[in-house]
Image: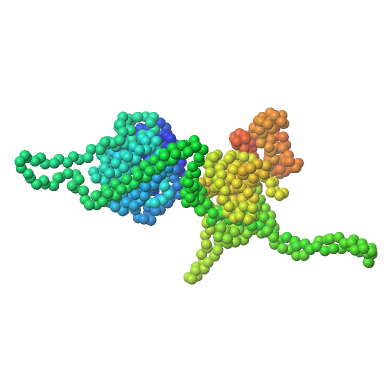
Amino acid sequence: MLSIIIPTLNEEEYLPLLLTEIKNQGFKDYEIIVADANSQDDTVKIAKSFGCKITEGGLPPKGRNEGAKIASGDLFLFIDADAISLPVRFLNDLVENFKSRNLSVASFPIYPQGKIIDKIFYWLYNLWAKLSQSFLPHATNVILVKKEINQAIKGFDEKVKFAEDHDYVKRAKKYGKFGFIDISPVLVSARRFEKDGRLITYLRYILAGLWMLFFGSIKSDIFQYRFDYSLKIKNKIGYNTSTMYKLPKIKFPTIKLPKLKSGKLKLLKPVKSEFAKFSKKQAFLFLILVIFTSSVFGFLAGAISGSYFYWEIKDFFSRLNIEIARPQKNEEEQSLYTFQEQAIVNVVEKVSPAVVSIIVTKDLPVLEQYYISPFEEFFFEPFFDFKVPQYRQKGTEKKEIGGGTGFIVSEDGMIVTNKHVVLDDEADYTVVVSSGKQFPAKVLARDPLQDIAILKIDQTKTITSDGEVSFESFSKVELGDSDKIQIGQTAIAIGYVLGRYQNTVSVGIISGLGRTIEASSGDFVEVLEDIIQTDTAINKGNSGGPLLNSKGEVMGINTAIDLEGQSIGFAIPINKAKRDVEQVKSIGRIVYPFLGVRYVLITEEIKEKNDLSVDYGVWVIKGSQGEPAVFPDSVADDAGIKEGDIILEFNNEKITIKNTLAKIIMKYSPEDEITLKVLSEEQEKIISLVLGERSS
């Protein structure tokens, strides 16, 4: 188990972001421990809402130690609360890398959510930590360590006032292997720079590094460490806020020279001081650090002064109507990925092998054209040559008549797509995987209510030299939880666009939830309820493809577009498909509870237009083509429900626009006994019945 330990003090702004990121990682075996230093805001309440263990903390060294005391895992991850964004599969990749390198303690890159100068500084620091990992371990305030190593060094030294993470890994290295894991960086807040000032913060870090190199761990308040950056509550746990924005005054050891007596000269003996104890290795490291520091500040000074003089000169020439063109960015600079772009690239690389194209073919008659004379039966030889064209069948020919997209949900080749893609029983379906290999597909089931179908392709069978039979596994997608979708989050679509462009990617956001639309494809028309709206470009051929989140999880099945608008697409929530997949696996078909009524959902507009007495429930009426309101011999028919009745409640749940009958009935199974509250001829009555079955 992985124990994630977070020291906190007034972290209500950042803690929920980190906890959400951890929860969305998809990592299975973990616990979260929050060591709180008597927060005066909602930090503890937030932690409890996420199911975290809570313990009393203090400054970070104490908080981490207290968290470790109650931890159940064999690995500890110490991380600060302002780590606001974790890369996709971060926890999985971190633990796998840690174990594969046989490490005992490790750190990894972080980057601040700040200005470009902050990212440059941290890039240099991460580079130094990576290069020096074998001889001078550094931590980036996030540490992964084995439980036994933490116990061996007795945790963090609570006497250390600043840079306790460096002291920790330095001591831990004596008991096991230290490594800097070079994976995608964790994004942290830039609050330290924003509150204390960048120059002061940078100088504090650099001077602290020099101090630790020559004098050891920092056990005094010389660098004025600050824990609570909320600025709402001051001086709660012992830091001195009066000197928070001053540079530290470092007192180096004084060197006392021997006094000379007048008239007598003596040879000076070697001066004994702290500096006399430095080894050649320390001197070499000091030289490297001085060069590194000089390079950083030289670069910063050049960048700041160059920028300043550029704008001054530009302003001068602009008054003379002379424009200075800025140098164009080269291709390498323009191709630098942002974190969001990299996340999208990662998703596409991860999911594309499991997205397939579906080609629909059918044997169609081949028609031959020929000509006849309409007067041939009256005259053997007509006076003029007049003929009309006729057609006759001359065999059949297999032709491509359509296509769509699907995605593999099991290693043995089960595929989810739209029902309207594979609606024709007489057609043949071929699946093309990302490698270009083709497989004949069989339709296992078509959902009777949703635009969902389940296909199956067979695995490639191979026989080894030993005569053993093995089957090649297919890449599969990871299904998310569509109940957790939020409006505004990133949405990524992959599909076989226009039947020509395989695995085309488009990106947008979730625009709306809980939509109801009437979708059509040829003669096939159906009403879809409670579906997702997105502005992600969905074109013909995208039908049946996955709509993904930024973690690469399938949120929905792309199914329809609004031709009257622009960038208005719709997807079926993936939780509906999960149910179908499980039923096909277990019983070989898709079944639904069936009531047996046609209806419209009552809104305020429908109530006023039809002079109804209530503004909620469903109104039992005929179909648009005159179909009966109540299905003959259905359970509703047997229970006495008739046209014009209004069903108000289903098993004591009120039917509303947000809580529709379709949504409520999906909670039940065929043969379940339920009760209905029905308004019939202005009289309310309770009807008990047993739900019927509707299957694929």
How far across and down, in percent of the image, does residue 278 sit? 21, 48
Q: Position of residue 418 (x, y in %)?
A: 63, 50
For residue 461, above or below residue 344: below
**Residue shown at 31% from the left, 53% from the top:** 134
Q: Residue furthest left?
A: 263
Q: Is residue 3 above or below residue 353?
A: above
Residue at x-position 26% and y-position 46%: 213
Relative horizontal placement of residue 377, taking residue 497 as reference (left or right): right
The number of callouts visible is 0
Q: Position of residue 198 (x, y in %)?
A: 37, 38
Foreground pick, 504 / 248: 248
Q: Relative to residue 330, is residue 566 drawn left or right?
A: right
Left or right: 418 in relation to 465: right
Residue 100 placement, left or right of 544: left
Task: Please report the residue visible at 71 percent of the width from the left and 49 percent of the height from the top.
Answer: 522
Which residue shows up at 70% across the image and 37% down it? 620
Q: Residue furthest front?
A: 320
The residue lying toward the viewer, choosing from 291 and 437, is 291
Examine the image and state in which quarter residue 593 appears. top right
Please, which colouring scheme is shown? Answer: rainbow
The answer to whether one can see residue 386 in this image is yes
Depth check: 333 or 189 in front?
333
Q: Which of these two is toward me, 176 or 187?
A: 187
Q: Please state the horizontal and vertical placement of residue 238, each as a whole percent of the image.
A: 30, 32
Can residue 444 be seen from the camera position used here? no
